[in-house]
Amino acid sequence: MTNIIKEKFSKAYSPEARDVFLTVPNLISLLRIASIPFISYLVSRHQMVEALIVLAISAVSDGVDGILARMLNQVSKIGQILDPIADRLLIFCSIVALGVAGIIPWWMLFIVGLRDLLMAIEVLVLAQYDYGPLPVNFVGKSATAMLMMSITALIFCDIWTNPMVDLLHLAALAAGIWGIGLYWVAGYIYLRQGFALIREVR
């Protein structure tokens, strides 16, 4: 099995994203997006065990679609858009659900939502100049990872009540605040890159 995987990866595949939609990785990404309302509903109802199970499946699928895209030579433009959209939707909807459940303060939702709104406006503006979404940078990946760890930990902490879990809850909140800070730093980088591209066109 290992040899088959190595053989697949050793084959040359197109580094350029293609204009294809119906691919296995894209189907996985769409299913991942479809799972977000279920995760949010479960979290808002404090059904945290079930939410963690669906979240774990979603996290595994996030890695699988990228591996399959390269193994099957199915790297696509729509796939490069769906992946960050899924991440942002999962973060935003999870924060909404945590707010509804009374686990986090609502100001966290406002700050994350404002950042995503600015990014959506930038994508629309860049589209007017025939530019697609900007590539994800390291700061953006770090922010997403930190926020996802914080969200997962907060969901986990709601299952039990004891001093150690309360301490973990505080640590998860702190990680979430740091993640939001990095989220905005990444947004600032994207805005600068977008303005630079527009200036070049003009």
Image (cartoon, rainbow, N blue to C red):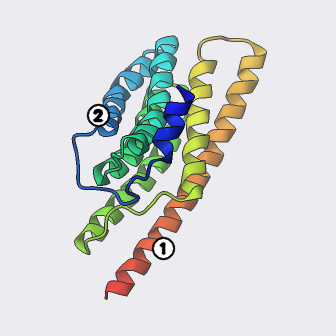
CA–CA distance in space, label 1 to label 2: 33 Å
Residue designated by label 2: 27
Q: Which mark's residue is nearer the viewer, 1 or 2?
A: 2
SS for tag 1? helix
Give percent across and percent down for residue 190: 47, 66
Question: What's under tag 1, amino acid-wise?
Answer: Arg
Q: Is residue 82 above or below residue 125?
A: above
Residue at 47% across, 12% down: 50
Give percent across and percent down for residue 173: 65, 35
Camera-side residue: 107 or 137?
137
Q: How many numbered tags mark residues here? A: 2
State the residue lying farthest toward the bottom: 202
Q: Earlier in the sequence, mark 1 or mark 2?
A: 2
Snapshot quadrant of residue 97: top left
Question: What's under tag 2, amino acid-wise?
Answer: Leu
- The crowd level at tag 1 (other Cα within 10 Å; few <14, some 14-19, many 20+) is few
Camera-side residue: 12 or 115?
12
Q: Is residue 82 above or below residue 124?
A: above
SS for tag 2? helix
Residue designated by label 1: 192
Residue at 34% across, 34% down: 33
Residue at 53% across, 59% down: 137
- The crowd level at tag 2 (other Cα within 10 Å; few <14, some 14-19, many 20+) is some
Camera-side residue: 20 or 184?
20
Q: Is residue 123 left or right of residue 194?
A: left
Say which quadrant the C terminus sits in: bottom left
Snapshot quadrant of residue 71: top left
Q: Is residue 35 left or right of residue 174?
A: left
